[in-house]
Amino acid sequence: MSQRTHIGRREFVRQASAAGVGLAATRFPTPALLLRGSPNERVVVAVMGLNGRGMVHAGNFTRGANTEVAYLCDVDGAVLAKAQAAIAGESARAPRAIGDFRRALEDKDVDAVSIATPDFWHAPAAILALKAGKHVYLEKPASHGGHEVELLVAAQRRYARVVQIGNQQRSAPRTIEAIQHIRSGGIGRPYLARAWYANTRGTIGRGKPVPVPARLDWELWQGPAPRTAYRDNVVHYNWHWFRRWGTGEICNNGAHEIDVARWALGVDYPTRVSSAGGRYHFDDDWEFTDTQEVVFEFDRGRSIVWQGQSCNGAQTFGRGRGVQIVGTEGSIVLDRDGYQLYDVKGKLVREEKEAAAANGMDFAGNDTHTTAHIANFAEAVRTGAAVRSPVSEIAKTLLLCHLGNIAQYTGRKLRTEPSSGHIVGDADAARHWRREYAPGWAPSV
């Protein structure tokens, strides 16, 4: 329920909208890219990666008013069969199940590719799809390092297709409303954003080499990554915690909250980045931090602090994940369920909730914001409407996440170029900007 102490919500939104913020997408329009000449045609989609988040993609594209799924793509035969059975029950025309998504790129009837694979596949798959003339819905972090972020932006510009990044909170009505209020001066001059994520992940143990399961195409699963032997503690989720394939918690979940923080402060690239933390909770194969605090400093006296707790669920402001924006005249605390507005003395001024609660700790992320985000993508493909998370804008957030990892790898405060995010004066740190690829897999625009 809303608590109203000063102004009614209608007047609150009117004042905020007068600031000219509106939907974040209005600043980043995409060109009209109509489907074979008719905006009334359905968007035909191939979904790549189906063990979790990809099934949310597939379900939304199947149920969408103007979308249909033509292909389900996964390198695990058991996952693929399960997905096909689930979607077949919802679809008038059963999608084809294939192991290699590149076969779908050859189909001229496919308009878009939806990608929910492990991180190391994100940019290479998206760039291949763009080269084939397909639009792309791409999960965060959309890349495995800074160089891939830049390649992805360049590919979108060159091939002039819609690319929506899966930062679905950009489609959350109450988050949009909170950002509007901040931009209208509702908390004075915002200068600090605190973003956090806390979970209780268990140990991944010490993996051992075992035969590859018959259901899994291990060669294709590795795809762009340098080859290594199969181990029993990697597939399907624990790849997140290995640097060969994953990008750690800051890119896995921090990408959402850091994006909201950056959006709220109105900042682009930092001037300095520092990180402290480590793998404290368990002694196992996990190669990233499970506890991390990253400080991003920007010009004009603004900062973002990200706190990641992978193995201790102690909450902040009663939330497992969220963002606090601090200003000279008040503050706002927000998450996927809504926001709370406080005056400068910490007194609650108002509270607004989303129409439907979202479980922010559900790794599949099946919520109304995702449904709205996917619908926005489909409308952009059909009519040229603006996407809410264009890659050209979300790329700035993704670079922050990668810089946080690099600062942790090196143990040094990084100086960065505020016009691009590039590391200045530290060749050792800058070498982490690029990753290694298996022969023949390096993406190019």
Image (cartoon, rainbow, N blue to C red):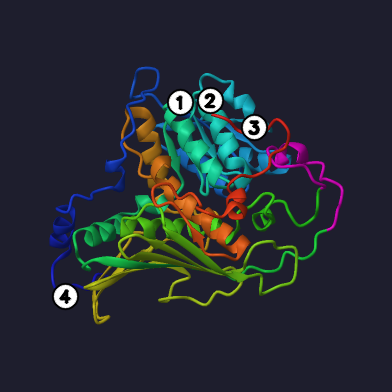
Q: Is residue 127 visible?
A: yes
> Which comes before the other along the chain, label 4 or label 3?
4
Residue named by callout 4: 5
On residue 97, which mark appears? 3
> What secondary structure is found at the residue carrying circle 2?
helix
Q: Is residue 175 left or right of residue 254?
A: left
Mark 3 vs mark 2: in front:
2
Upstream in the sequence, badge 2 or badge 1? Answer: 2
Magenta part of the chain:
208-229
Q: CA distance from mark 2 to mark 1?
A: 7 Å
Quick check: 65 left or right of 22?
right
Position in image of residue 278 (x %, y %): 63, 70
Q: Could you tell me which secondary element the residue under label 1 belongs to?
A: helix
The alpha-carbon separation of the residues under discs 1 and 3 comes to 27 Å
Give the residue number, with chain letter if any, for mark 2.
131
Q: Are marks 2 and 1 in contact (CB under 8 Å)?
A: yes
- Give the image location of residue 371, x and y in percent: 41, 46
The amino acid sitting under disc 3 is Ala
Residue type, mark 4 in image: Thr
